[in-house]
Image (cartoon, rainbow, N blue to C red):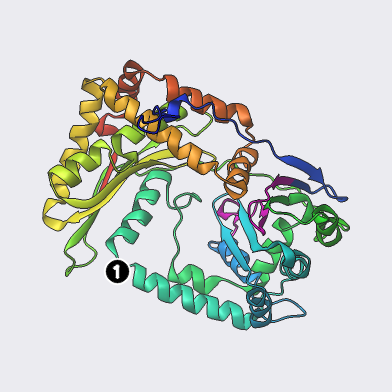
């Protein structure tokens, strides 16, 4: 080996990316378990997923409140005792409620799995929603909301979703003081019993797993039909976007910055244009070297950062451009956003820029596949959206093969300024 000669540089697009397959098991009661094993570190991640997001609410905020308060008391232990048990073993039990799904995720050392599974079982199968914990939750959430409503970016995020989807749609519905006050323990119990059931549960586990992990999961989650057998019907809720498309809101008279949002509807991930738009959006505003950043941050100095993103919602999607800029340059920022939209319509992307973005996107995917935790998250997103590895490989193919002409045609179809909602909150 001649160490005076540098090794050849291999572009990310030249890698043949393979999505490592998972193992699948079923517990005795039918709960599917998706497993990604790794011996790298003596840790594991165990996630239980339920169709218990805001889409299924009959009362505003009950999905998030139910998900949060399940951990705050059972018939045997208080919230403090549960948290102390988890903290004592250096573990972390996280919970989240999204639009469609809600999750409970345990991160722990492999050696403590057998001790912590009974705690997780109790949280999932025996919450009692104590009245004092509900009252504390309401108080804390209302205080957070009061503080956040003074922030222009928070207010802008609330309003742009409402304009895009409608204030009564789960994607556009927002929290309020009245909604927090209206939360009742009985309704949380009812929501819990309907959605957190054995037949609505999926389990995703990754890491350095104990040899007896499946028998352990079966012992605590697979031997009974806990919480009964419920079959949910996902309602087809209509989107009711705002009729107007330009909005200016005055929120903080003493503020020095304004929040800018420019957004439009877009087909969801099942549409053939979605993977193509991922590439076009990256060029436009999806990474630090994007056109929006080069123009509005680097050249004009209007903002510290500006990004565009595609929402990955189940029913539909949206393209959202967001930034915070000086109050005196918010309108100029919007003008520059539209200039970049039109430039992509009128001029093909140079090959050098397209090659750079291809390598960036493939490199990001390679990073996202680095380790069992990241791999199981990738598989979880596919499984929960009724997709398989073909969707993953088709996206890779699109990134590697899409042409400048295809991107220009896509921009002509979706980047017309008049199709965008425009919001400034100052």
Identify the magenta region: 34-58
Q: Is residue 261 visible?
A: no
Apparent side of residue 350 relative to residue 62 in the rendered image (left or right): left
Residue 37, position as x, y percentages in the image: 70, 47
Whether the magenta-drawn stretch holds residue 121 is answered as no
Q: Quadrant of residue 287?
A: top left
Residue 34, position as x, y percentages in the image: 72, 45
Residue positioned 27% across, 29% down in the render: 416
Q: Quadrant of residue 2?
A: top left
Q: Nearer the viewer, residue 290 or 270?
A: 290
Q: Nearer the viewer, residue 332 or 280?
A: 280
Q: Quadrant of residue 292?
A: top left
Residue positioned 17% across, 45% down in the render: 298
Whether the magenta-drawn stretch holds residue 57 is answered as yes
Q: Is residue 30 visible?
A: yes
Question: What residue sits right under mark 1 in the picture?
Answer: 150
Residue positioned 76% across, 78% down in the render: 75
Q: What is the secondary structure assignment of the residue under circle 1?
A: loop
Please identify the quadrant where the C terminus is shown: bottom left
Please identify the quadrant where the N terminus is shown: top left
Quick check: 358 above or below 155? above
**Callout 1: few (<14), some (14-19), or many (20+) C-alpha neighbours within 10 Å?**
few
Residue 31, position as x, y percentages in the image: 79, 49
């Amino acid at each position: 080996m001649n160490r005076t000669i540098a090794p050849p540089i291999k572009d990310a697009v030249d890698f043949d990316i393979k999505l490592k397959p998972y193992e699948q098991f079923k517990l005795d009661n039918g709960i599917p378990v998706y497993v990604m094993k790794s011996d790298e570190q003596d840790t594991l991640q165990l996630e239980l997923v339920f169709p218990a997001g805001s889409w299924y609410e009959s009362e505003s905020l009950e999905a998030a409140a139910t998900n949060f308060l399940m951990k705050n008391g059972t018939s045997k232990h208080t919230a403090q005792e549960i948290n102390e048990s988890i903290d004592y073993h250096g573990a972390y039990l996280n919970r989240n409620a999204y639009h469609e799904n809600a999750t409970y995720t345990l991160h722990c050392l492999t050696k403590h799995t057998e001790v912590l599974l009974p705690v997780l079982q109790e949280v999932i199968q025996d919450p009692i929603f104590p009245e004092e914990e509900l009252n504390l939750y309401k108080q804390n959430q209302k205080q957070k909301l009061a503080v956040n409503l003074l922030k222009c970016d928070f207010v802008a995020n609330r309003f742009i979703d409402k304009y895009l989807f409608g204030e009564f749609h789960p994607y556009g519905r927002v929290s309020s003081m009245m909604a927090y006050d209206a939360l009742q323990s009985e309704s949380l119990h009812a929501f819990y019993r309907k959605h957190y059931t054995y037949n609505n549960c999926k389990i995703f586990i990754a890491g350095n797993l104990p040899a007896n992990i499946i028998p352990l999961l079966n012992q605590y989650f697979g031997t009974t039909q806990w919480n009964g057998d419920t079959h949910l019907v996902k309602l087809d809720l209509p989107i009711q976007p705002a009729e107007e498309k330009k909005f200016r809101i005055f929120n903080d008279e003493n503020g020095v910055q304004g929040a800018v949002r420019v957004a439009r509807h877009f087909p969801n991930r099942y549409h053939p244009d979605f993977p193509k738009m991922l590439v076009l959006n990256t060029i436009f505003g999806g990474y630090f070297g994007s056109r929006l950043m080069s123009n509005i941050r680097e050249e004009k100095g209007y903002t510290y950062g500006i990004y565009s993103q595609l929402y990955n919602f189940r029913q539909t999607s949206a393209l959202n451009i967001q930034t915070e800029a000086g109050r005196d340059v918010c309108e100029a920022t919007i003008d520059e956003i539209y200039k970049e939209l039109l430039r992509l319509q009128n001029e093909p992307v140079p090959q050098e820029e397209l090659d750079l973005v291809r390598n960036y996107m493939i490199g990001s995917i390679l990073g996202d596949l680095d380790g069992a935790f990241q791999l199981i998250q990738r598989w979880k997103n596919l499984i929960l959206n009724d997709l398989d590895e073909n969707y993953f490989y088709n996206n890779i193919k699109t990134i590697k093969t899409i042409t400048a002409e295809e991107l220009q045609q896509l921009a002509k179809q979706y980047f017309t300024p008049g199709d965008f909602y425009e919001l400034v909150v100052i």
